[in-house]
Image (cartoon, rainbow, N blue to C red):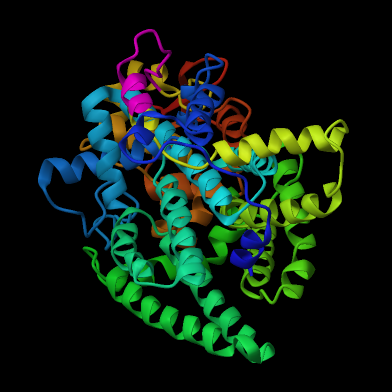
Amino acid sequence: MPAEIAFERPKIQNTRTAGWPRLLTPSFSDLFFVFIIVWMFMTSPEGWKRLLLDADTAFHTRIGQYILSTGTVPHADLFAFSKVGQPWYAFEWLSETALAFAYNTASWKGIAFLAGVSIALYITLLLKFTMWKGANGLIALVIILLTATGTSIHFHARPHLWTLLFLAVSIWLLEANRRNGGALVWLLVPITALWANFHGGFFMFFVLLGLRVVGCAAESYFWPEDRRERWGEAMKLVGVGAACLAASLLNPYGYHLHEHILETLKSKWIIANVSEFKSPSFNSEEMYDIMIVMFAGLACIAPLIRKKNLVEPLWILFLAYASLTSVRHATIFLLVVAPIVALELSVWWDAVSAGSSKASLMGMMNDVSGTLTAGLPGTSLLIPATIVAIALMPGLQWPTEFPEKWVPVKFIEKHHDLLASSRVFTSDQIADYLIFRNYPRQRVFLDSRHNYYGEDIGNDFIAISSASPKWKELVEKYKFDLILCEPDEPISVLVQATGGWRVLDRTDKYVLYARDGKA
């Protein structure tokens, strides 16, 4: 069991000051928070801008602005002409409200700042948790840096960032319950109530909690000497899970929220056509990092079982499978598995380096890791002070708009009135931004709410964008006035080759077609 492993490892004296003076003495993990901010967002001109590479951010912000301005959450669609007024749930309403508040306060700087701080907090929290489990400081740093790089594939200013924070806290509470027992684990109930209003990722917590209950029950069966303790943990977690499930109903939509999430997860069309739901392609540095941690996690299964731990092997196997079937689960895999890998590697390192002289390479590395292991735990006022300093620091290159490579902001601004008064066929990403820029005048055909539009409209969108034989019929069916796309897309090539449309404007990246007779 992880707690037992941690207690068996050699202790290194932590000489950090106790009491209030400790809050003025930064730990290495506090300095790590500063490092993450600088490394990810301040070492290149694109740093903070990378958080706005997904126009879903604009759509979520618009929903939040609607909630702030009306004081209500929507229960029917507000944005589509292809599915007018149908029931729809803003199931991430609280995170969307936070994004809107950040935007209303400081424009895109506010959103980039909120997202960047959330990411740095999540990574730092993961490092602190890994050290709490008993990992070697040097190994913990290496594994968490690999995790930071791997999870960066989803570092966009969107509601899922809060799932990373909530899940990291939840896993820590579950581990603390195994190690120390007590009532602290019941904090998961209010956390779930909040989480269910921030992001649908709270469903993954219930899966991991269920696997933990199964693992505890299996441990009690296979190792009778631990039966009372492990069975007691399983029953306690069943009660916690039931309370968390009830708490998750404390949202504006009640159980309809859960139905909505399940329908999304079961949608064959989304799984087949939305990139985040597809299997990963291991052809980038980030995906190589995920692969390294995945292999390491799978290698940890046998040692964990030998230590009478079945919970973490179940987590590793399930999340590895989920990550290989859908890339959106890779970040969850890294979050959960990285601390496990770091601890198992630490145990292995202790065994390999035992007896090494201080003059040897291993001895010198032991000295370095010993210093890190002693200095990483603890929390001071450095983190909140850094957050305030970043918010007020002049000269930082904050984003002022979405990158033109992803969203034709200037193009849309140039034709703002025409676009807002027209039925436009365009990508879901551009539609997201049109909603942000032009609501309430603008209505779109399809945006990033693929689960809302469903298979029929989704297939019609694909048929038009790929210029299938029935594209003309569908264009007439939905009465499109304008087509905004990239010049080399199939629909662009066919529109140029057929009559009834003319080029209204174009750049190297985008072209706007207008139906003949449309001003």
In the image, farthest residue toward the left:
70
Please indicate whether residue 345 sits to the left or right of residue 130 in the image.
right
Spot occupied by residue 358 in the image (x, y as percentages of width and height): 83, 34
- Residue 517 seen anywhere in this rendered image of the structure: no
- Residue 1 seen anywhere in this rendered image of the structure: yes
The quadrant the N terminus occupies is bottom right
The quadrant the C terminus occupies is top left
Please indicate whether residue 110 sits to the left or right of residue 374 in the image.
left
Residue 117 versus residue 6 in the image, above or below: above
Q: Quadrant of residue 152?
A: top right
What's the residue at 45%, 23% (across, down)? 408
Residue 335 versus residue 509 in the image, above or below: below
What's the residue at 51%, 38% (across, down)? 15
Spot occupied by residue 193 in the image (x, y as percentages of width and height): 29, 64
What's the residue at 25%, 36% (across, down)? 100
Give whichever of 332, 226 is nearer the camera. Answer: 226
Q: What is the number of callouts on the image?
A: 0
Spot occupied by residue 18 in the image (x, y as percentages of width and height): 39, 40
